[in-house]
Amino acid sequence: MVKEADKNAKKEAMKSIVLALHKGLSIEDAKARFEKDVGDIGSTEIAELEQGLINDGLSPDEIKKFCNVHALIFQSALEKSSSEGTFPSHPVNLFRQENRAAEKLIKAIRENKKGDAADIKKALLNLADIKIHYERKEQLLFPYLEKKDFTGPSMVMWGKDNEIRDMFKAALLALNSVVNDKDIAKFKTNHLGPLLEEIEGMIFKEENILFSTALEKLESGDWMNILRESDEYGYAFIEKPAETDKLLGDLSSSFKEEPVVEGNIIKLPTGTVSLSEMTAMLNVLRVDLTFVDKDDKLAYFSDNADRVFKRSKSAIGRKVQQCHPPQSLEKVEAILSSFKHGYENSADFWISMNGKDIYIEFFAVRDTDGAYLGTLEVAQDITKLKKLKGEKRL
């Protein structure tokens, strides 16, 4: 009971210090208060502090502004935390290996005193692979922490990741104006130095706060799912351990997920939707969807208002060969045959029709064992898409 009370007192003291920082308390005074009122504290409690501040209504943007300061104040306590032992293919170990590789690249950049703009650019482009590390963290680790009602990292740390991404862009752009040694010195002061410091700061926060907290809060099944999905995002600087493929193969055979329909609910391997939601989603897409089953019969088509090719419900159950003019029948048969025999998985065509550019794709649809289930036709008006230039970001 005393231990729990002591823990709560430390948390309240930490919250008080951080809130005071936001009101102008100096770093020196904050450090003094931390040593006096808090002392030793675990990394999980530090992470819970930021979560608590968010829950109390403090803006994540405000926390983000000060999170480097927080890490500096808590550094002495954090460095006393011991690292947990995990097997080689554990996602945390893979994240840590990437951080070690990033540190080596940063060290090499700093030690290269004679590098010209081309050398610096090459080194920065290599280091920029750290963005793969960030994306895998954001898209896999953060969601599982959020499922534990722990949203602090995704709200605060993601913002810092984006700042580092922006710094990479600004640094690479600034390099285009570097022509002499004076420019290089200025570039290192204004761009390179701050970027490397931010990356090192993020490594520190991951190693001493995020990973320790995640290891405490996530369960073995969560880590297995993170590992299974990691290949989709890739790895930064490192090769995936050889045993990981075997482990993933074993997982795939042991945890094969099949869709299930329960009443009006469709439970898919990647989420759950109702029948009405599924129908609405298919119909709102700005593409024509037409599915032909394994027996070549028209089984389904989406019913959006702007279909490229008109479809009639009377065609449901009709052989697809009867839905095409004789001139294209031979090509249709060839595509279906190649799909059924596993020779091809897709085919595409593009035509002009009524002043519009139409793109048509056919996809072989297979089950998890590779057996042919049918063919999906996707047709869309790409007239507007062909005119797009530049970017339109969120």
Image (cartoon, rainbow, N blue to C red):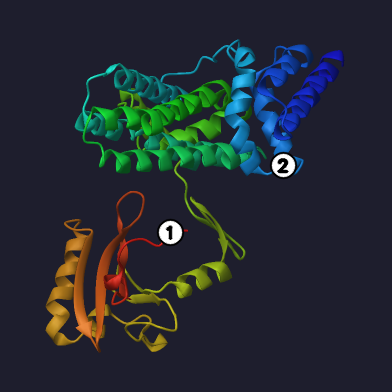
Alpha carbon distance from label 2 to label 1: 27 Å
Using residue 362 as the reference point, say whether residue 219 is left or right of it. Answer: right
165 or 219, nearer to the observer: 165
Q: Quadrant of the N terminus?
A: top right
Using residue 256 as the reference point, say whether residue 243 is left or right of it. Answer: left
Instruction: Say what amino acid the circle numbered 1 marks.
Output: Arg
Residue at the spot x=59%, y=39% of the render?
156
- Toward which corner of the image does residue 334 lie, by quadrant? bottom left
Q: Earlier in the sequence, mark 2 or mark 1?
A: 2
- Toward which corner of the image does residue 81 lie, by quadrant? top right
* Residue at the spot of label 1: 393
Residue at the spot x=28%, y=77% of the render?
383
Residue 232 visible in this rendered orientation of the protein: no
Instruction: Say what amino acid the circle numbered 2 marks.
Output: Leu
Mark sitting on residue 58: 2
Whole-percent x and y of residue 356? 26, 83
Question: SS class of the residue under badge 2?
Answer: loop
Q: How would you rate the neighbour count of disc 1 (Cα within 10 Å): few for under 14, some for 14-19, many for 20 or more?
A: few
